[in-house]
Amino acid sequence: MERVFAGMWLAAGRADQLDRTGAFVRRDVAGASVLIVRAADGSIHAHHNVCRHRGTRLCTGASGTFQGSIQCPYHAWTYDLNGRLVGAPHMDEVPHFRKSDFPLHSVQTDVWDGHIFINLSPAPSPLRQQLAGLPDKFAAWKMADLRLGHRIVYDLKANWKLIIQNYNECLHCPNLHPALNKLSHYLSGENEPLQATYMGGRMDLRPGVDTLTMDGKCSRGFLSGLSDVDVRRVYYYAIFPNMLLSLHPDYMLVHTLWPIAPDRTINVCEWHFHPQELARPDFDPKDAVEFWDMTNRQDWLVCELSQAGISSRAYTPGPYSNREDLLYAFDQMIVKLHEQR
Amino acid sequence: MERVFAGMWLAAGRADQLDRTGAFVRRDVAGASVLIVRAADGSIHAHHNVCRHRGTRLCTGASGTFQGSIQCPYHAWTYDLNGRLVGAPHMDEVPHFRKSDFPLHSVQTDVWDGHIFINLSPAPSPLRQQLAGLPDKFAAWKMADLRLGHRIVYDLKANWKLIIQNYNECLHCPNLHPALNKLSHYLSGENEPLQATYMGGRMDLRPGVDTLTMDGKCSRGFLSGLSDVDVRRVYYYAIFPNMLLSLHPDYMLVHTLWPIAPDRTINVCEWHFHPQELARPDFDPKDAVEFWDMTNRQDWLVCELSQAGISSRAYTPGPYSNREDLLYAFDQMIVKLHEQR
Amino acid sequence: MERVFAGMWLAAGRADQLDRTGAFVRRDVAGASVLIVRAADGSIHAHHNVCRHRGTRLCTGASGTFQGSIQCPYHAWTYDLNGRLVGAPHMDEVPHFRKSDFPLHSVQTDVWDGHIFINLSPAPSPLRQQLAGLPDKFAAWKMADLRLGHRIVYDLKANWKLIIQNYNECLHCPNLHPALNKLSHYLSGENEPLQATYMGGRMDLRPGVDTLTMDGKCSRGFLSGLSDVDVRRVYYYAIFPNMLLSLHPDYMLVHTLWPIAPDRTINVCEWHFHPQELARPDFDPKDAVEFWDMTNRQDWLVCELSQAGISSRAYTPGPYSNREDLLYAFDQMIVKLHEQR
């Protein structure tokens, strides 16, 4: 938790969800509760959800809109959307007290192509460094333009690392995901060699298949700007530690992982579409939602079985196949993180 | 728990609840379960709820009446109400066994003006020492005469110390308790300097307000013997570690706090009235009960938000206002208790 | 857990429950999950329920039948019923990989007169050594012939040792089990001196009582081969650490204990009868089931009260009567186990 979730940039939602001044989402992670807020000047700020007076949690809603300021329910200390303390009843009687000394503790925040990231570390290296080649690689999808079509929140009895491992190999697909394997052969595509902060690859759609939906047909237009090659592929990238980004010809699927306990993870899964498609009177994301919800649940089952099994006294690590090369690299990275100082 | 709840006198109920021989209440605190019992000679005894034979819990009821003795359900070892072992089947065959060697482990008990106190420490200093000036201060209310009118048990997700802190300042009142503030101005009254074992002060009723009820009217007579000054006030005293005593012109409100976990406390809240009032055919405590139940729930909300917030990785203690002087003194006392070897 | 439940032979069910090739039961104990399986050649094998590839739990059912092999739901690694790895997709591409190196981790298993035992230790001493004189002692009951008539699973908030202690003395019977005491006097019978790995004794049926049922009548024939003496007795043996074997003139009652936590134990209670009786059209085990279910629940109550009481800060061990001699010996054995190396 300290080195990974309190040290790295975490995907924390979409900028378009903060669609007006005061709009916020709350994210609880690594012993922190964070409010991500749209300020009056349009900038995005993230604050610890803890009053500077007596530590009261300021807000318990998962999302919503602050009316111009954030007020503590206890003694009415009041902060502007940028986190500055602007009201503190009776504190003017206290010698040497200055409101400017007590802004909300801030959390670093940045945005990549519509994806908000936060970082609990006080002085993190830039987000761009963590993203490395990804902004260029996925520029053509114009992700910032896309808008939420559907969201499902899953509660898994498994460590977040098992979910990342599950995401990064398709050796399990013929056995576990016959429907997926019918649309996209498990040996198709290619993995990119593991990067320091992400890993992924692509798989090819089978001939006659347009995208990943229940029947392989696509009732939507493809995202404009994609190459002829990219509309025949699905890209799967795990951006450490908590974002799984799946780019389809016509939609973007994003999982964000929120560890709750060593054996429990909340997984927020969102389907994003182009606003032109969302605006159509007959827009219906069901074909994509049903397909991945079914496939997700197959995956969560084996993630939970793995969690149970590796907790056994009899567990010993087994050999990987060549199709699980990314997992080996991921394991090495985690080991290295633990060995650091 | 060891220094505070297993070392100090704890308010544990009212003597009048033990209204006949054998009547008991059970209190579970600091890893102990205690039976407080009215003996045949009218005296009050407290015993650990643990059979001396094989450790069986003798009684699981919260209150009730023992029929002359306390019998273990397992092997029928039997104790009189004073805790003496009076029956132990087949133990007479055991060489050197003497029943007089195996009374119930006893718990110290004492009574102040109708309030029962227990102390888990084997040789505590006297209750009077812990109470210091309180018996004189509140003699006029003749608390021993009062009788229970209503009880509500609250289960709070907050440390007991946060409840004590909440009780001892009214800076939060205008924001959190508008109804209370309308009846009794939050800056009225005065605090007594912190004592070693209690802290408190008084607040004044606003002109035209008779007592703390939903409408500020009093449908009961004032307690006889109160001075003209005292019938215009409400006294709020936190008697460490677990009693909150709120004396109104016409009733007594008592909270007793029972820590269950570092972040959880059971709060037993009781409204006590004069028996003459209770005896009236039209007696109805609703006006006082509703007022404080509403106010309590407002307080519990912020206590729970504080518990959540100070558990955050971002929490740092903030500055107190001059209106929170008792809290600072309380913090100092807790620190000192922890420093005592 | 390590020395007792992971080191000793554990009663784990009945061989007749594995009534066909592939039939299995799952037992979770001491941080392990174990599959006990009937192989094609009729032998019984026990395997850790953990795939050798990535640790996935293979099976979550409590019992059932494998169709010829055991397949991991994740990547389809497949084991035969003897635990040999027979399929591992894509692993043939991995240099030096040999399926014969990755059988399921095995668990020792053996059978005594129809009772299956497992042992988590890699090289345990033989089951016969743990059973010592019991196979001879109880040969006349021909336990292997008996078949399950009824099963009740109890979930107790008590340590397994308190259940063993409760089982091995009847001093509590007159107080707690008046119905049992009416059928079999609590001072009747005799205990065998404690053995290294079991303890027990017998009690006599009162004149006119045929067996332990609600009315003491026996609607079944006695087990053939019992002596005139044995049909007037009930034998109660605790075979450490998890089997309670109660032999009646006409049926066998078996408890197996499965510790879940220091203060929680699953107790599987089974009534076994002779197949000739089970085959009768009017067979009804209700008289025996009701009697022991009632008596069990009385026992579980005091076991749970003991668990609560000995967890108290005030608990001190008390004196045993002469009727609790086996318990003292059991305590000594547990102490000795803890002192080993």
Image (cartoon, coloured by chain):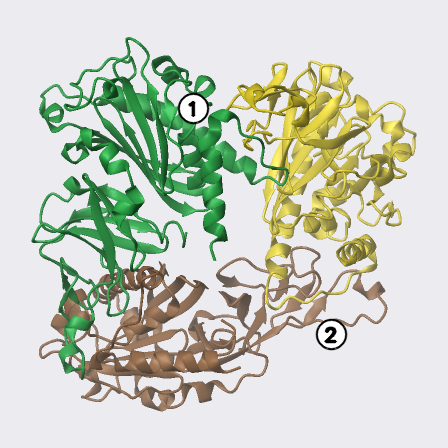
Chain colours: A green, B brown, C yellow
Q: Is residue A334 left or right of residue C163?
A: left
Residue B191 location (% of width, % of height): 25, 85
Q: Does residue C93 appear to the left or right of C250 in the view shown?
A: left
Q: Quadrant of residue A48?
A: bottom left
Residue B105 located left or right of residue A281: right
The answer to whether one can see residue A334 in this image is yes
Q: Can you give x and y, in whole percent of width and height, for residue C11 in the image?
A: 74, 35
Q: Which residue is mark 2?
A: B101
Amino acid on which disc 1 is placed:
Cys
Q: Is residue B268 above or below residue B230?
A: above
Q: Is residue C129 left or right of residue C91?
A: right
Residue toward you, A108 or A125: A125
Amino acid, disc 2:
Asp
Is residue B218 at least partly visible in the picture?
A: no
Mark 1 belongs to which subunit? A
Snapshot quadrant of residue B274: bottom left
Q: Secondary structure at mark 1?
A: loop
The nearer-to-camera label among 2 and 1 is 1
Q: Residues within 10 Å of mark 2 (few under 14, many from 20)?
A: few
Towards the viewer: C95 or A274: C95
Residue C189, position as x, y percentages in the image: 86, 45
Residue identifier under label 1: A170
Residue B237's place in the image compared with C319, above or below, is below
Instruction: Specify few, some or many for label 1: CA neighbours under 10 Å numbering under 14, 14-19, or 20 or more.
Output: many
Q: Which chain contains the residue that carries disc 2?
A: B
x and y percent of residue B89 in the render?
Answer: 76, 60
